[in-house]
Amino acid sequence: MAEPADQIHARAVAAGPGGRLPNPDFVTWESFPFEVVDGALVPKVLAAPTDEAPRKGEGGQDCFLCADEVPGVIWTNERWRVKHLERSGLPMVLMLEPIEHLDLPDLDDDLAGELGRITVWLSRIMERLPNVERVHVNRWGDGSAHLHVWFLARPTGLPNLRGTFATLWDDILPPGPEDVWREDLATVARKLATHDGRAQV
C-alpha cells in the first residue's frame, strides 16, 4: 500500500509554518557534526581523542535486546527476528536482529549466510510495496553490542530523501497514517514467512 509522495508532501507542508518543519532532536546531539557560527552552518571543531564509552549490552550484560519480550516483532524464525520501530517519517523502518547475543563479527559462516539471504528477501519485499522506491540497509553498532541491521524504506518521488539523507528525514517528517503503516507491516511479515519463519502480526 505505502503512502504516495504527494500525500507525504502535503502532510509535511501542513506540519510547519510556511512548510518548514521544526528541527529534529538530533541537531542537539553531541555527535551532530555542524553548528552555526556567524550565521553560517559550519562543521564543528573535531574533539580530541578519548576513551570509547562501553556500548549497551557489552559482554551480554543488561542487554535490552536479549529480553524475553522484545516489542515490535513482526517475524521470527529460530535464529532471527524482524521488528518495527515506532511509526516515523519514512513509510517503514525495520530492524533485523539475531535472537542470540551476537555482534556482526561474531557470526559464524552459517549465520552470515542467513543474514545475507534474509537481507535480500526483506529488501526485495519492501521495495515491491507500492510507492517505495528503495530500501537502504545500514549497520552502525555504536550504541548497542547486539547486532541490529536497519532497513529504511524511501518513498518514490521525493528527491530530498535520496541517499544517506533518508535517515535524517525519517526524524524530520511527521509520521504517516497508522492504518497504512500497519497494513504494510503485515504484508512484509506475511511475505517474509513464505521464505522461512512465522509472521507475528
Image: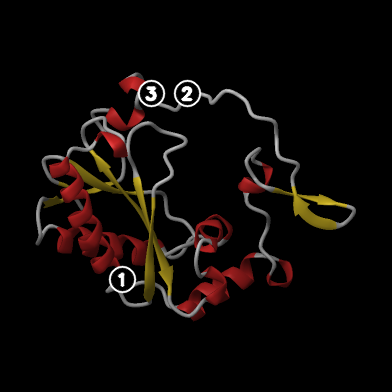
Identity of the amino acid at label 3? Glu
What distance separates the C-alpha of mark 2 from that of mark 1? 36 Å
Disc 1 element: helix
Quadrant in the picture for residue 111:
top left
Residues under numbered marks 3 and 2 in contact, where contact means CB atoms less than 8 Å apart? yes
Identity of the amino acid at label 2? Pro
Q: Does 126 sit left or right of 192 as displayed?
A: right
Identity of the amino acid at label 1? Glu
Name the residue tied to disc 2: 54
Counting from the top left corner in percent of width and height, residue 153 is at 39, 64
Image disc number at residue 58: 3
Quadrant in the picture for residue 196:
bottom left
Q: Please determine whether, in this image, residue 87 is positioned above or below residue 60.
A: below
Q: Does 105 sit left or right of 4 as displayed?
A: left
Q: In the image, what residue occupies the spot 58% across and 69% down?
A: 12
Name the residue tied to disc 1: 127
Classify mark 1: residues with Cα within 10 Å, few (<14), some (14-19) or many (20+): some
